[in-house]
Amino acid sequence: MPRFVNVLVRGLLLLLIVAGILLFYARYVEPNRLRVEEVTVSSAHVSEAADGLRILVFADTHFGPYYTTEDFERVLSAVEDAKPDLLFFLGDLIDHYSRYSENGDARWISDVLSQMEAPYGKFAVYGNHDYGGGAESKYPTVLSDGGFQLLTNETARLPDLGLTIIGIDDVLIGYGDPEVAAAAQDDSFNIILTHAPDIADRVISYPADLILAGHTHGRQVDLRFFDDLVLPPYGKKYISGLYSLPGERAPQLYVTSGLGTTKLPLRFLSVPEVTLITLSSS
């Protein structure tokens, strides 16, 4: 065999081995990791009572055959360690409700959600998967049984903390109305919950201080050459992490990379995460 052919064959074998290792990692290792991302958000609009408040954010569990309540035990442990004051879930609870069959129904999900504790409340919004797959009418019950208050273009106020929480419904196949951000108050720290991050540009004209979103999975497989194909509608501009946005109150947007997977049970360079946000009045 000519020497260059021998080198070529060896090179191809090496590439196959490396590809196999990366595929194994993306399928069986990274999806089973969990990162607690810690962020401090400072604002003059944070009240003295809310200074140091700890908010834990999670999204995109996509419960199904590749993400189970057993996998969610890692999140429960993270919540127990973090001892948050508030909990926010940003949508896409079950990947496809009509196909979900963990022990027959979704009550197991309510059971694990109910184990999460936060003294000032647990709040959630719809994601697009919470409308698709027959979940629309079931989602509110699963969440309420888990102790979460669902905000569907609605507002919750925590006057003792000087907080206003505005939940925007899903904008892909739901009834999302970014104009509900008009409920933000000048004398409050205003938090906007949404599944889709790109609607942030439509709410910064209101006195928003902190916008929280999911939806993108941080690309899930973080190969940036394929953004047009990989990233979903309303998730193509703000992809993951913390963004400082223009606006009267210099709002900040945090996009969490989420926990589960969809379409392909793979994660690569996008470790599943929960986010612990600490408010600061400095």
Image (spheres, rainbow, N blue to C red):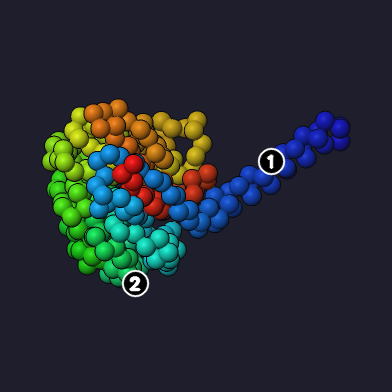
Seen in the picture, residue 171 relative to 63 is either above or below; the reply is above
Identify the residue position indicated by label 2 in the image.
Answer: 103
Q: Which residue is mark 1?
A: 15
Q: Look at the numbered disc 2 and give the secondary structure of its residue.
A: helix
Decide if residue 88 is in sight here: yes
Residue 109: image location, x then y, percent = 31, 66
- In the rendered image, the vertical position of residue 177 relative to residue 135, given as above or below: above
Toward the viewer: 66 or 215? 215
- Tell me if 135 is positioned left or right of 74 in this view: left
Q: Nearer the viewer, residue 107 or 275?
A: 275
Say which amino acid is labelled 2.
Asn
User: At x 49% / y 39%, what residue is drawn?
Assistant: 222
Residue at 31% in and 66% down: 117
Residue appearing at x 34%, y 46% in the figure: 280
Where the N terminus falls, by quadrant? top right
Neighbour tally class for label 2: few under 14, some 14-19, many 20 plus, Cα within 10 Å: few
Query: Would you say 109 lies left or right of 149 here?
Result: right
Q: Earlier in the sequence, mark 2 or mark 1?
A: 1
**Residue 161 location in percent, x, y?**
21, 53
Which image quadrant for residue 214?
top left
Question: Which amino acid type is shown beneath numbered disc 1?
Answer: Leu
